[in-house]
């Protein structure tokens, strides 16, 4: 079938503009395949990030028909049903556009670093490995799926008005360590999490949960952080 | 712009990050990567990391080492395999201690499962050796190592693409790289450089590899006179999603999945009666191709792009959701099926380069078959060849390789830079790279790289694939040579300097073309069948003539072949039966 990719483009030299490309595709092709076909055969200047091609590296998050998705995890038939259907492609929001569908991700990773995203535990280990029960391991499983694609931050309405909010992406990473029975870093992370720009910035709009390509229950993780903060306060009161 | 570091790591996958973590403890270290952090292809590894922990049943490093040697069809260097298997245990504990969230046994220990070619007591039966975190073990390793690098304060240059390596005689002086954001060419002077750029499966049409897997490290080294080892050995993983090549982990069979042909037969009974669906990958991929050629594929037309089924419908929803959630998701997304009730259509997919930049057990790059090394030049992970995989890598051993040898290389670098000096680098060291860039942007009209890439992928898939023969390999060498000629006419369509992905793609294509030529030429030379290299015209292994590593030098557009001895100090080669 034929579809039309309507791409919101940007170049540092020319500023924003829009281009349409007609592409022959199969309904089961990925939207990424359509983009690669344009780049490889029609217009080498069309710019986007991509790598793994199957939804695990987080490179090709963009807004497809108005919603954050991974181009490699979205099939043509998911977004275009009829011949000559128009599929709109836009860069993620809440990040500076660098070129076409590429946005600056340095802020995403800077926020990630603020939650101290590494296991904090200086205790000696006896027998090679730390013991962790199946239930303890399951408690933070959801958050371990995160691929840092930035879809959640793009979708978050709080970030529309409050760029000081750390955003759902970093909070999911905080949850991954906060609820790991092996971690001892909760106190180190509290100044960032227990602040207006931390977990309390979340207003539970659930957009992040709806768009997450890894189906992480993002809002639920953030709410769990809020409860953990309150429990710590009660325990210390 | 010119930078100075003690150590430069090229590539931010598992091997590069582990090396960076170790080197940065004692040396001023920076990582340059053409991707953003955690986008590297280590993150796509699914099934697990092999280590004889013995958490669920008896196991020994010695058995793991033997399986690795036999799995590699005796082309493995045996001292390296023993080191690999012994160090794997320490490496897994280290990863766990650093936060890697492994699945757990009911006793709270790291859980382990079966994987292809991993056996107890030298081949008796499958053993549970693969330590896993659901079916996203690589993702967890990549994240854990990046997190540790943050903790260690490692410096990163994100989206820098390596263009050249500076080698003077037998000494490495640094690298030259392109900054994607600005189009600027940077020179990184360094006492030590480690290449950890991963694989190059993008030579082939159907591959599990990321689009970024273009062999930049090996290609850059080859163009500077470094030989590449065992390039004829490229692994085809038996279970890629039909048409797409997306990997369905071997763990699906480790958990009990079964391959079936159009008659519903469990055809592996005829090819590997003991290990069945858990035989090594090269044997299963050949078995599938043999079934397809015999008309036993699902379409039954005898063509090699036909497919068979991977049946996981008897495993139950709980196993699929707890132990194989990602491949369940892939099947739903890309095939519209639920593998708990519908078998998955699969075909072999180009997966892993056993060959690469030759190194010793400390990651030092070798200059010839006699053990001479390049001072200050290192490689680790898939782009390197120690060789612990020989003619065919066992499942889970890629992750073992990168943590074991990434760490060893990083430690060696930390020691080396203490006694080494920053060598002189000429002011115009970046001139060849700048000239390449200038040519691509000179405004001349040329063909687009996309068509050349298509032709390369197809010829490599059809003629340098699972089964090979003289006529096909001759044709492949000719075709790739022609494509390399055409590449010199290619020009960028995108004329801007900033974020020019077009140029990056053209440079990546050159790397793939050079590695394709080396692969096809090395395959043409080896007139025997061993591991992942199967010749229809030479169907037997020939130890008398070919129990040797190959070395391939790229010289003036041609390939010169040489040899390097195999370490067979522990186990004498035997017929390989499963």
Image: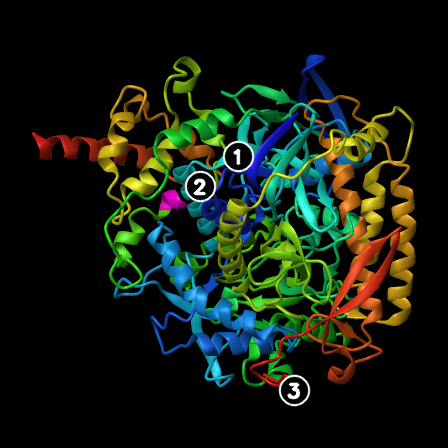
Residue B313 placement (x, y as % from top left): 49, 66
- The mark lying in front, picked from 1 and 3, is 1
In the rendered image, residues at marks 1 and 2 fall on the same chain: yes
**Earlier residue among tags 1 and 3:** 1
Q: Is residue B101 magenta?
A: no
> Going from the N terminus, do you reach mark 1 or mark 2 first?
2
Secondary structure beneath disc 1? Answer: strand
Find the distance from the CA under tag 1 to the CA under tag 2.
10 Å
Chain of the residue displaying label 3:
B
Q: Which residues are magenta?
A: A142-146
Quadrant location of residue B470? bottom right
Residue A60 in the image: state x and y as whole percent. Answer: 59, 35
Left or right, residue A139 beside residue B527: left
The colour scheme applied to this rendered structure is: rainbow
Above/below status of B156 relative to B305 = above
Mark 3 lies on residue: B575
User: Which residue is label 1 attached to?
Assistant: B156
Of mark 3 and mark 2, the one earlier in the sequence is 2
Q: Residue at x 54, y 51 (%)?
A: B15
Determine the main secondary structure of the stretch shown in magenta. Answer: helix
Please, what secondary structure does the residue beneath circle 2 have?
Answer: helix
Q: Quadrant of the N terminus of chain B?
A: top right
Residue B328 versus residue B418 in the image, above or below: below
Q: Are marks 1 and 3 on the same chain?
A: yes
Distance from disc 1 to disc 3, alpha carbons, whole Å, reads 47 Å
Compared to A59, does B495 lie above or below?
A: above
Residue occupying image coordinates x 42% and y 47%: B144
Residue B370 placement, left or right of B159:
right
């Amino acid at each position: 079938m034929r579809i039309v990719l309507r791409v919101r483009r940007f170049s540092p030299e020319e500023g924003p503009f829009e281009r349409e490309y007609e592409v022959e595709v199969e309904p089961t092709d990925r939207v990424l395949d359509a983009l690669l076909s344009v780049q490889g055969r029609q217009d080498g200047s069309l710019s986007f990030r991509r790598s793994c091609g199957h939804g695990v590296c987080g490179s090709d998050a963009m807004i497809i028909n108005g919603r954050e998705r991974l181009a490699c995890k979205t099939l043509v038939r998911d977004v275009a049903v009829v011949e000559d259907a128009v599929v709109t492609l836009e860069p993620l929001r809440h990040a500076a556009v660098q070129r076409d569908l590429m946005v600056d991700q340095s802020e995403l990773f800077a926020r990630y670093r603020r939650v101290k995203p590494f296991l904090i535990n200086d205790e000696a280990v006896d027998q090679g490995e730390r013991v962790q029960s199946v239930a303890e391991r399951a408690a933070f499983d959801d958050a371990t799926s995160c691929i840092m694609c930035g879809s959640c931050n793009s979708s978050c309405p709080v970030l529309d008005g409050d760029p000081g909010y750390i955003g759902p992406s970093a909070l999911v990473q905080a949850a991954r360590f906060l609820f790991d029975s092996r971690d001892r870093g909760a106190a180190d992370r509290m100044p960032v999490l227990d602040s207006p720009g931390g977990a309390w910035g979340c207003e539970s709009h659930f957009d992040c949960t709806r768009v997450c390509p890894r189906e992480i229950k993002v809002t639920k993780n953030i709410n769990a952080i809020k409860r953990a903060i309150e429990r710590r306060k009660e325990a210390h009161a | 712009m010119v930078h100075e570091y003690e150590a430069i790591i090229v590539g931010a996958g598992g091997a590069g990050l582990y090396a960076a973590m170790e080197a940065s403890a004692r040396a001023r270290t920076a990582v340059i990567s053409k991707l953003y952090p955690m986008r590297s292809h280590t993150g796509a590894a699914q099934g697990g990391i092999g280590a004889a922990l013995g958490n669920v049943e008896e196991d020994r490093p010695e058995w793991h080492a033997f399986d690795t040697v036999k799995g590699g069809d005796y082309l493995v260097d045996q001292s390296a395999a023993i080191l690999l298997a012994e160090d794997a245990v320490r490496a897994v504990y280290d990863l766990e201690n650093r936060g890697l969230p492994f699945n757990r046994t009911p006793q709270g220990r790291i859980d382990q499962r079966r994987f292809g070619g991993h056996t107890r007591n030298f081949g008796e039966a499958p053993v549970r050796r693969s330590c896993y975190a659901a079916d996203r073990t690589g993702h967890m390793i990549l994240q854990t190592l990046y997190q540790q690098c943050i903790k260690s304060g490692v410096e990163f240059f994100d989206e820098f693409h390596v263009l050249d390596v500076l080698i003077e005689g037998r000494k490495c002086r640094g690298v030259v790289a392109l900054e994607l954001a600005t189009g600027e060419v940077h020179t990184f002077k360094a006492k030590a450089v480690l290449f950890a750029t991963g694989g190059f499966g993008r030579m082939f049409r159907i591959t599990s590899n990321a689009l970024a897997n273009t062999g930049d490290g090996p290609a850059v080294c080859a163009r500077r006179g470094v030989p590449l080892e065992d390039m004829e050995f490229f692994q085809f993983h038996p279970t890629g999603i039909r048409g797409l090549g997306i990997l369905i982990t071997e763990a699906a069979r480790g958990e009990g999945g079964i391959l079936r042909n159009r008659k519903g037969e469990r055809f592996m009974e005829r090819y590997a009666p003991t290990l069945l669906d858990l035989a090594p990958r090269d044997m299963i991929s050949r078995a599938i191709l043999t079934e397809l050629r015999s008309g036993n594929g699902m379409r039954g037309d005898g063509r090699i792009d036909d497919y068979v089924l991977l049946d996981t419908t008897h495993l139950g929803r709980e196993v699929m959701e707890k132990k194989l959630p990602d491949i369940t998701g892939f099947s739903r997304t890309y095939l519209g099926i639920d593998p708990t009730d519908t078998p998955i259509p699969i075909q072999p997919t180009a997966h892993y380069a056993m060959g690469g930049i030759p190194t010793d057990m400390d990651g030092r790059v070798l200059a010839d078959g006699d053990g001479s090394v390049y001072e200050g030049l290192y490689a680790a992970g898939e782009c390197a060849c120690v060789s612990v995989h020989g003619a065919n890598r066992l499942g889970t051993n890629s992750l073992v390789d990168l943590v074991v040898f990434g760490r060893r290389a990083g430690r060696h670098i930390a020691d080396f830079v203490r006694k080494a000096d920053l060598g002189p680098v000429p002011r115009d060291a970046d001139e060849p790279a700048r000239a390449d860039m200038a040519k691509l942007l000179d405004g001349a009209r040329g063909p687009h790289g996309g068509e050349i890439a298509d032709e390369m992928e197809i010829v490599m898939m059809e003629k340098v694939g699972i089964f090979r023969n003289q006529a096909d390999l001759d044709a492949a060498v000719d075709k790739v040579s022609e494509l390399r000629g055409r590449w010199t006419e290619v020009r960028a369509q995108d004329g801007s300097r900033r974020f020019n992905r077009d140029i990056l793609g053209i440079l990546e294509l050159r790397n793939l073309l050079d590695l394709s030529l080396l692969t096809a030429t090395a395959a043409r030379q080896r007139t025997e069948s061993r591991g992942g290299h199967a010749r229809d015209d030479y169907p037997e292994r020939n130890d008398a003539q070919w129990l040797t590593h190959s070395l391939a030098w790229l010289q003036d557009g041609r390939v010169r072949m040489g040899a390097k001895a195999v370490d067979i100090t522990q186990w004498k080669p035997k017929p390989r039966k499963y």
